[in-house]
Image (spheres, coloured by chain):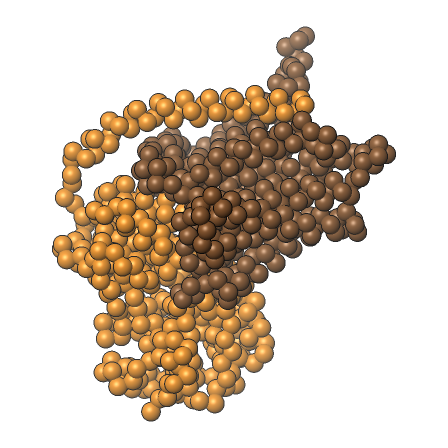
């Protein structure tokens, strides 16, 4: 069996295994899996409203997944997507509420602010890694907490309207929302962000696969020492990759800030989008197209799951278990690969 | 390069699956939608959306669900579609989806439980003008939304009186959830109660910043007890569960030690029968039942604020723990203050500004 086919089959088998084990768990705990999956399906595609919500849900997942995948291709583990996501969210809303500009300037400015904020947040771990070899995993994890509490402080003390825990609604001119998209999806919160997410997928693919800079970045990811020996600046590429990764994550925040919510609220804890991004990137094998489709799958699962308790009486935590199982099986794809190899060898004989 | 092609192929397969699936489904659905519109059932149905605390938070959401269950059972309704049900939210983004789902399932009245759902309810109420909504703890000015507010400060005031009379170290703690107006009412009322009963008592006020972090509640409680506080009141939803855990642990280690915790929203005596002094009751269940009944009878108070205070039995204080050394004195004081509040002789402050000017006579 060719390597390429194995590569395609591994994630698919992982998803199937996740669903099968999920079914077994449901049977064991006395729920009807057919009802549950039907409810999941209806909750994701049953009405145009839900389709709109699914797209809305996976838009930030795509960007968060790209952020993780991009850093990973350069050999860095950006666990700080969550933090960069939060500061991007805040920055976009900040620009959205405090300026009054025509739409053509305001909206790009708000999006740009989110990208810059995310990039700056990721610059710190990138710089520390490049300059002092501080491990980026630790710094990015800690930066998540700094981001969470700093943004909460800013929202509460600088931006909050009178009610105290959230900013005002952003001006219409900075909003990604559209009456048109809402009307075709029966009042879902679908917004134009999906276009940005798709464009970003293309940008990432082009950047990594079709430019010299992308080649350098990937070379650093494959083998830092070889890249260094070949005369590439490893440090520069590390910082650059974190900047781009952070910009993607910041954009994901702008999706929530300018699209889904239109405001930033004090958060009691992490949103989970950044961490979901890690799983998305993993399932998508760190390629932009892979990320795109695994984000869709996650969006379907998350939105569809909300319908499970009502329609099938199955707790929606079960979907979290299924997602965890899928990630588990992707992570242990080595096992699947061995099986596939054995299988194909037997066939040849 | 290989990886990229692999990813592309995989993605195409997935995409084809989803797209084809979507097409098939939407056709089916048109049929069901029309049939749904045709058979209008007269039976009243009601549902609620919890905030991120979940339906088993031992406090606010749970109380609302208990109220809804009671209402359902009293009226011979069944759990599920066409009866009564709930949906849980895992993140802020889910509020809107959940509320919309319930409206789409034709529930006659949909509750948004909690302040956090304010903007979601407002937005959907504008879109779905024929649906009826109720929101707890926030005000939404839409003709199809009933806003339910409580005078939490009155219950917290009584809790403050009880705490002040029970403390031996003259040191009391307050653990808040997020700093939002509702919790500010709890804080102000509690501080006013302490001040009214025993002005020299010191109160340590801390906010955990979350309603769903029991471990954080426990670490704050641990610090407070260690620094000398012997009674702690929480208004922090599921975060407060950590307070009870800490109190029970400490009591188990040293049963002679006098430490107390005060619960919130529902009678939380079950969280630690030896350490829960009392609970500041916020009868979300009463309000939910009351409002559901009104809606069922066709008297839904849309666009209005339903205010539940002590006079309406919407708030109050749970029975004092019989193991409390000062039980009789506390009960007498509570009775006294309750009457003053009900009659309007004492107006309990609901904000920190009002608290500054508060003086109990």
**Residue A8 percent location from the top left of the image:** 59, 22
* Residue A292 vertical placement versus A134 (above, below): above
Q: Residue at x 65, y 55 (%)?
A: A142
**Residue B353 percent location from the top left of the image:** 40, 79
Q: Colour of chain B?
A: orange
* Residue A186 vertical placement versus A94 (above, below): above
* Residue B344 vertical placement versus A49 (above, below): below
Q: Residue at x 68, y 35 (%)?
A: A73
Between B261 and B192, the one nearer to me in the picture = B192
Q: Residue at x 63, y 47 (%)?
A: A119
> Which quarter of the image is occupied by the C terminus of chain B?
bottom left
Between B16 and B35, the one nearer to me in the picture = B16
Q: Quick one: which residue is furthest to the right in this view?
A: A229
Q: Quick one: which residue is furthest to the bottom in this view?
A: B361
Q: Taking A123 as reference, is B202 left or right?
A: left
Query: Does residue B89 appear in the picture of this structure?
Result: no
Q: Residue at x 67, y 22 (%)?
A: B2
Q: Colour of chain A?
A: brown
Q: Quadrant of residue A337?
A: top right
């Amino acid at each position: 069996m060719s390597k390429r086919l194995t590569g395609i089959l591994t994630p698919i088998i992982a998803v199937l295994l996740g669903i099968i084990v999920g079914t077994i768990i449901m049977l064991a705990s006395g729920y009807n899996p057919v009802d549950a999956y039907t409810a999941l399906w209806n909750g994701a595609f049953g009405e145009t409203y839900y389709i709109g919500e699914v797209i809305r849900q996976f838009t930030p997942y795509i960007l968060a997944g790209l952020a993780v995948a991009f850093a990973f291709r350069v050999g860095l583990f950006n666990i700080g997507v969550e933090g960069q996501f939060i500061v991007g969210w805040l920055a976009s809303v900040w620009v959205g509420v405090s300026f009054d500009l025509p739409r053509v300037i305001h909206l790009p400015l708000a999006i740009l602010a989110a990208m810059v904020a995310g990039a700056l947040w990721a610059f710190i771990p990138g710089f520390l890694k490049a300059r002092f070899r501080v491990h980026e995993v630790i710094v990015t994890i800690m930066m998540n907490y700094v981001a969470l509490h700093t943004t909460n402080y800013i929202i509460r003390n600088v931006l909050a309207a009178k009610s105290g825990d959230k900013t005002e609604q952003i001006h219409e001119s900075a909003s990604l929302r559209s009456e048109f998209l809402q009307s075709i999806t029966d009042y879902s919160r679908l917004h134009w962000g999906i276009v940005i997410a798709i464009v970003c997928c293309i940008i990432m693919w082009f950047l990594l696969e079709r430019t010299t800079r992308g080649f350098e970045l990937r070379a650093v990811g494959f083998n830092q020492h070889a890249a260094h020996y070949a005369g590439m600046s490893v440090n520069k590429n590390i910082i650059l990759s974190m900047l781009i990764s952070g910009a993607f994550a910041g954009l994901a925040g702008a999706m929530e800030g300018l699209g889904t919510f239109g405001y930033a609220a004090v958060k009691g804890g992490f949103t989970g989008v950044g961490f979901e991004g890690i799983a998305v990137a993993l399932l998508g094998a760190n390629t932009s197209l892979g990320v795109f489709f695994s984000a869709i799958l996650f969006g379907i699962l998350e939105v569809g799951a909300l319908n499970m308790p009502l329609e099938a009486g199955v707790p929606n935590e079960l979907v979290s278990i299924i997602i965890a199982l899928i990630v588990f099986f992707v992570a242990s794809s080595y096992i699947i690969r061995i099986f596939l190899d054995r299988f194909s060898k037997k066939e040849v004989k | 390069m290989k990886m990229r092609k692999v990813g592309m192929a995989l993605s195409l397969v997935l995409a084809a699956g989803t797209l084809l699936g979507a097409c098939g489904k939407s056709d089916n659905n048109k049929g069901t939608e029309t049939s749904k519109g045709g058979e209008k059932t007269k039976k009243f149905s009601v549902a609620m959306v919890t905030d991120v605390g979940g339906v088993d938070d031992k406090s606010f959401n749970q109380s609302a669900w208990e109220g809804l269950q009671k209402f359902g059972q009293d009226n011979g309704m069944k759990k599920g579609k066409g009866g009564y049900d709930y949906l849980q939210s895992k993140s802020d983004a889910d509020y809107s989806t959940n509320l919309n789902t319930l409206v789409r399932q034709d529930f006659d009245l949909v509750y948004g439980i909690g302040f956090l759902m304010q903007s979601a309810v407002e937005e959907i109420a504008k879109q779905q003008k024929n649906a009826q909504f109720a929101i707890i703890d926030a005000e939404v000015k839409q003709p199809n939304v009933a806003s339910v507010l409580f005078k939490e400060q009155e219950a917290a005031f009584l809790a403050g009186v009880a705490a002040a009379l029970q403390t031996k170290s003259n040191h009391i703690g307050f653990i808040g959830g997020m700093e939002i107006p509702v919790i500010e009412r709890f804080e102000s009322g509690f501080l006013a109660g302490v001040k009214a009963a025993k002005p020299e008592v010191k109160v340590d006020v801390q906010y955990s910043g979350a309603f769903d972090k029991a471990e954080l509640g426990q670490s704050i409680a641990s610090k407070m007890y260690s620094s000398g506080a012997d009674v702690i009141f929480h208004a922090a939803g599921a975060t407060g569960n950590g307070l009870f855990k800490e109190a029970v642990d400490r009591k188990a280690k040293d049963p002679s030690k006098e430490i107390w915790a005060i619960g919130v929203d529902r009678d939380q005596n079950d969280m630690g029968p030896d350490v829960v002094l009392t609970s500041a009751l916020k009868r979300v269940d009463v309000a939910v039942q009351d409002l559901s009944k009104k809606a069922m009878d066709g008297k839904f108070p849309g666009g209005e604020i339903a205010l539940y205070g002590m006079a309406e039995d919407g708030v109050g204080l749970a029975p004092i723990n019989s193991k409390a050394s000062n039980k009789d004195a506390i009960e007498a004081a509570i009775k006294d203050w309750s009457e003053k509040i009900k009659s309007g002789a004492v107006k309990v402050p609901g904000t920190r500004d009002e608290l500054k000017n508060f003086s109990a006579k």
